[in-house]
Image (tube, grey):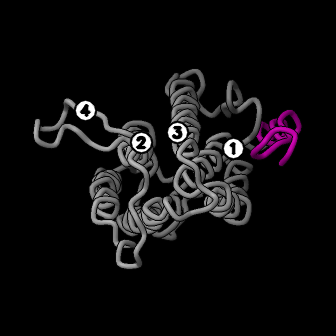
Amino acid sequence: MADNDSLGVQRGNYNWTLPGPLLLFLGRLACIPLQYSIIAYHPLSILGFSRPPTGGSIVLPCLPAQWATQPLSPVVFLAMTTALVAKQGIWVLGIGNEYMSIPFATFGVLADFIYEGISALVFTGAAVNPFWRPSFLYVGAAIQMTAVLLELAAELHRKSFKSKAENKGKLYTDKHWGHCRHPNFALNVVYGAAFGFAAGGPIYAMLTGGMYLSNFTLNAIKPKEDYLAKKYGEQWEQYKKDVRWKLFPGIY
């Protein structure tokens, strides 16, 4: 049942090795200073765009004294990426147990950096964006970080269930998975839209949220459900009857 496509998720291949997950985590870590560079150097200034509002300042005791005082708004923006990278690190190095290929990890790093780099660039144009308000940054960040934590909790609950010998061969259907069949995907859509809302307001949020939503509805859900149907058989068929919704209860 394993997927032989090196750029695909290797479902059913539990020969976990370190290189792929480590590459993904280190590459994602590198995205944080790269985004900082985009915000700090503000390439849109060549078009005459002023910097986004600083929102005041914040002291970061983890930094050397000469760098400890930072503008608040960029710190909040980068905190969203930091939270997501931390969650991804926990998942690839501590929760996930399927093989991850080097090409898949490389693609994941590059795709996320392009997406987050564009979002950082959009954020640097906030001062001239008629659809953006300073409050959107904080509201979006709060929703994004909450969704990241909820997804991590969902994965940890499933991991705890699967780690018990008596649950071998059983499908996990409790907590988050009792409301929709792919709560992790649903929360990806939420924090993707929230990240876009924080960076560029509601119009950009529709683009970022739509990107996540289209990926799952048109690409990821069907092969995952096909795999689960083969793996769990009647358990999966009963689960589909009990939990009708794929992503959002009452909607889809």
In the rendered structure, find residue 182 and report the number of the disc placed on it: 1
Local crowd size for mark 1, using a 10 Å CA cut-off: few (<14), some (14–19), many (≥20): some
Residue 250 % position (x, y): 87, 40
Q: Is residue 184 left or right of residue 54?
A: right
Residue denoted by label 2: 55
Q: Is residue 144 above or below residue 43?
A: above
Q: Residue 217 or 189: which is nearer the viewer?
A: 189
Whole-Å distance between the Cαs marked 2 and 1?
37 Å
Q: For numbered disc 4, what is the local secondary structure? A: strand
Residue type, numbered disc 4: Val
Specify the amino acid type for callout 3: Tyr
Left or right of residue 223: residue 83: left
**Residue 249 colored magenta?**
yes
Residue type at numbered disc 1: His
Residue sitting nearer the eye, 224 or 117:
117
The N terminus lies in quadrant: bottom right
**Start-end of magenta stretch:** 234-252
Disc 2 residue type?
Gly
Above or below, 41 against 251 in this view is below
Residue shown at the point (52%, 22%) measured from the top left: 164
Q: Nearer the viewer, mark 4 or mark 1?
A: 4
* Residue depicted at 27% across the width and 42% down the height: 70
- Residue at numbered disc 3: 138
Confirm or deny contact between disc 1 and disc 3 (CB under 8 A): no
Residue at 52% x, 23% y: name it.
Answer: 165
Tell me the SS state at disc 1: loop
Asked if residue 84 lies left or right of residue 193, the reply is left
